[in-house]
Amino acid sequence: MATLTFCTTTLFDHGAIGQIGDTLKAQGISRPLVCTDIGLVRAGIVDKLRGAMSNEFQATVFQDTPENPTEEAVLAAAALYREAGCDGIVALGGGSSMDLGKAVALTVTHEGDMISFTAALGGAQKIGPVAPLIAVPTTAGTGSEVSSGAVVIMSNGEKLILASKHLVPRVAICDPDLTLGLPAMLTAATGMDAVAHCIEAVCSRQVNPPADAVGLDGITRALGQGHLERAVSDGSNATARWNMMMASSEGAMAFTKGLGAVHSMSHACGSLPGLRLHHGTLNAVCLPPVLRFNHEKISEVLPRIASAMGLAEGADVSDEIEALNTRLGLPKNLGEMGVTTDMIDYLSAHAAKDVCTLTNPRNVSRDEYAVLFEQTIAG
């Protein structure tokens, strides 16, 4: 079993879930709150987690994590944490469950409105040590298990980022076996989330060569070696699942140097009430137009990305991503996902304020976001 120490300690291998008991004990947790969703309860994954714990642990389950975590859900989970006398958190699931778990860990240890801790308002300075948190991903996409950030829809409707070194889970348990039952479309969408993280991180205006190397390795695993398409076509392929979970974690390791306009656009769309849009799918759709927008600023790094993707010299990365989205069965544009042109004013204003815009390789104004959204809605 590989033990990786980068942002946090990561236990990574098939069957790693068996380490949950020892990990809880090492972190001094005896009464964990398991933050998860109803789908994982019904699929038996929560029972598998609890079965890996001995009777000395008394777990309480919060199963109402929405597709995009909300402040309301965080406050409900925090109330359950206090009511049950919990002393730590296990975030089990995709990015939503892990982000919710981070926000709960913050809420039960800090006073004040959650929005005051968001990155856009300088909230990172206000965040101190939080409740002990262990992350157990069940998808290969967000990499939230090794990242310092969480994205939550606040009570005012904005989808905002919480970010602090204190929000990095103390331990990540990455067991690719937990992803073996994922449907093909969810595998595709979460896989493209990982790819978008790797590509945007490599393109970020920040200088961090080690992070670039990690991001490029993630691109190589997912696309250059074909493990994303292999996992989509054969969900039981254990090797593909291992490599996609590694690419997912690498994406989050890489974006320690920041992301860009793809994520600003995705965060804006993800805040739209009623649509419940999947973050990874949004990233996949927004990635090609943003790459074209940034082209002049990333011309030197694009050949390295193309090489990692296994493309021939001179291939257009944007076109290849669009073709990949089509092969994976993902939407061609935001219009197919229900986003309409009358939403552009709201979306462009939201994206322009998003902290990911700060590390995009090219400056993006609200008006330029409006054009990008118009292009991406039409496809």
Image (cartoon, grey):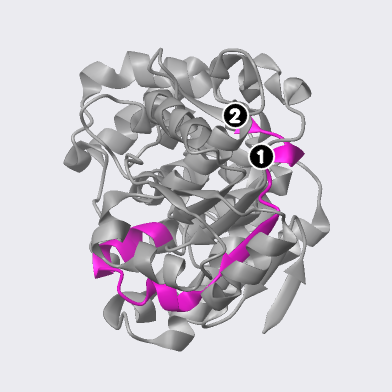
Which residue corresponds to the image point at 74% horizontal and 71% vertical from the top-left?
Answer: 4
Task: Look at the image and give the residue range highlighted in magenta.
Answer: 162-190
Relative placement, left or right, of 146 versus 227 is: right
Which residue corresponds to the image point at 46% horizontal and 64% vertical from the top-left?
Answer: 140
Relative placement, left or right, of 371 versus 110 is: left
Distance between mark 2 and mark 1 Cα atoms: 7 Å
Residue 250 lies in the magenta stretch = no
Q: Secondary structure at mark 1?
A: loop
Residue 179 lies in the magenta stretch = yes
Q: Is residue 235 above or below residue 92?
A: below
Callout 1: 10 Å neighbours few (<14), some, many (20+)?
many
Q: Are marks 2 and 1 in contact (CB under 8 Å)?
A: yes
Callout 2: 10 Å neighbours few (<14), some, many (20+)?
some
- Residue at numbered disc 1: 131
Q: Is residue 109 above or below residue 233?
A: above
Q: Quadrant of the N terminus?
A: bottom right
Which residue corresponds to the image point at 72% horizontal and 56% vertical from the top-left?
Answer: 27
Decide if residue 24 is in sight here: yes
The circle on residue 108 is 2
